[in-house]
Amino acid sequence: MNRITIALSKGRIFSETLPLLQAAGIRPLEDPESSRRLIIGTSRPDVSIIIVRASDVPTYVRYGAADLGVAGKDVLHEQGAEGVYQPLDLAIARCRMMVAVPADFDYASAVRQGARLRVATKYLKTAREHFAAKGVHVDLIKLYGSMELAPLVGLADAIVDLVSTGSTLRANNLIAVEDIMPVSARLIVNQAALKLKGAAIQPLIDAFAGAVQAEEAHAAD
Ligand code: ADP
Ligand code: MG
C-alpha cells in the first residue's frame, strides 16, 4: 500500500480544505487547533496529514517529505514553485494582495512626485516586482507579521499585505490603494510522487477537482 502524506497549515487553509478532504473520503482523526500533534492520522489508513507553517508547505512538498500540500498563491509566487506540480486552484482562502496606506496619506501624489516610499511587507519579491513594474522607488522593510502596524508607528509609508474583508485595514485607519493580485490556495504535488504513486494520488486530485467544481456550481446558483 502506498502511503500518502498531505501538508497543511493550521487555520483558514486547514478548515477550508476539510470539505475537499471529505470529498476524497478523508477525515482527520484530530483537530490541529487543539492537538499539539504535528502528524495526524486520518480515516484512511494510507493517508496522513502533517501540520506545517503556511510558508513551509512548498518546501515539504518540493523535497518529497509530503506528497501533496495546500499553499496560498501568495506563498507560491513569493517563493517560486519549481519542482512541484500545481494541478488545481482550490478556490479557498481567497483574498487579494494589496498596497495599503494610512487614510490621510496621499499615495497617488507621492507616486506622481517620484517620492521614495518605505514599504513594509513579508512579501519582498512580490512587492519588489510590483513597484519596479510601476517605476516606483521603494525601500522594502521585511516583517514577519502584523504589517498593518508599521505605518501607524512611522516604520513605513505603505504596506503590501493580504486583504479579504478589509476590516483589519479599517480598524487601523488604513486604505487599500492598489490591487496586486488575487490570491487563493492551490493544490501542489511532488512530481516524483505523482509518477511513483500516481495510482493513489491521481484519485485524490480528481476528488478535489470534483469538489471544487461542485462548490463553484453551487456558488453560481
Ligand atoms: P502565517 O503562517 O504567516 O501566519 P496565515 O495563517 O496568516 O500565515 O495565512 C496562511 C495563508 O492563508 C496565506 O498564505 C494565505 O494564502 C491565506 N490567507 C492569509 N490571510 C488571508 C485572508 N485575510 N483571507 C484569506 N486568506 C488568507
Ligand atoms: Mg497568521
Image (cartoon, rainbow, N blue to C red):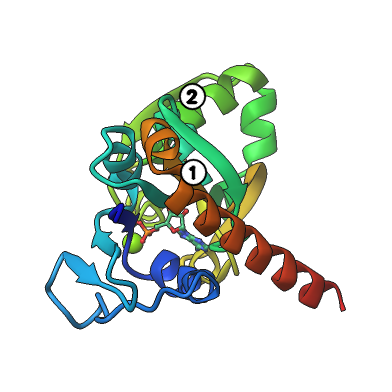
Please state, as top left, top right, bottom left or bottom right, where the N terminus lies in the image. Answer: bottom left
**Callout 1 secondary element:** helix
Q: Is mark 1 within 8 Å of ligand 1?
A: yes
Residue count near mark 2 (Cα–Cα under 10 Å), binned few <14, some 14–19, many ≥20: some
Against 55, residue 163 (above or below) is below
**73 with respect to 206 (left or right):** left
Residue tagged 2: 128
Please state, as top left, top right, bottom left or bottom right, where the C terminus lies in the image. Answer: bottom right
Residue 84 place in picture, x, y as percent: 44, 33
**Callout 2 secondary element:** helix
Residue 193 place in picture, x, y as percent: 37, 38
The amino acid type, in three-letter code, at marker 1 is Asp
Instruction: Depth check: give the residue in front, 94 or 128.
Output: 94
Instruction: Depth check: give the residue in front, 153 or 122.
Output: 122
Q: Residue at x 46, y 43 (%)?
A: 198
Instruction: Depth check: give the residue in front, 67 or 74.
Output: 67
Instruction: Depth check: give the residue in front, 49 or 164.
Output: 49
**43 with respect to 40 (left or right):** right
Q: Between tags 2 and 1, which lies in front?
A: 1
The amino acid type, in three-letter code, at marker 2 is Arg
Question: In the rendered image, which quarter is residue 15 located in?
Answer: bottom left
Against 191, residue 206 (above or below) is below
- How many marks are shown on the rendered structure? 2
Q: Residue at x 53, y 62 (%)?
A: 93
Whether label 2 touches label 1, CB < 8 Å: no
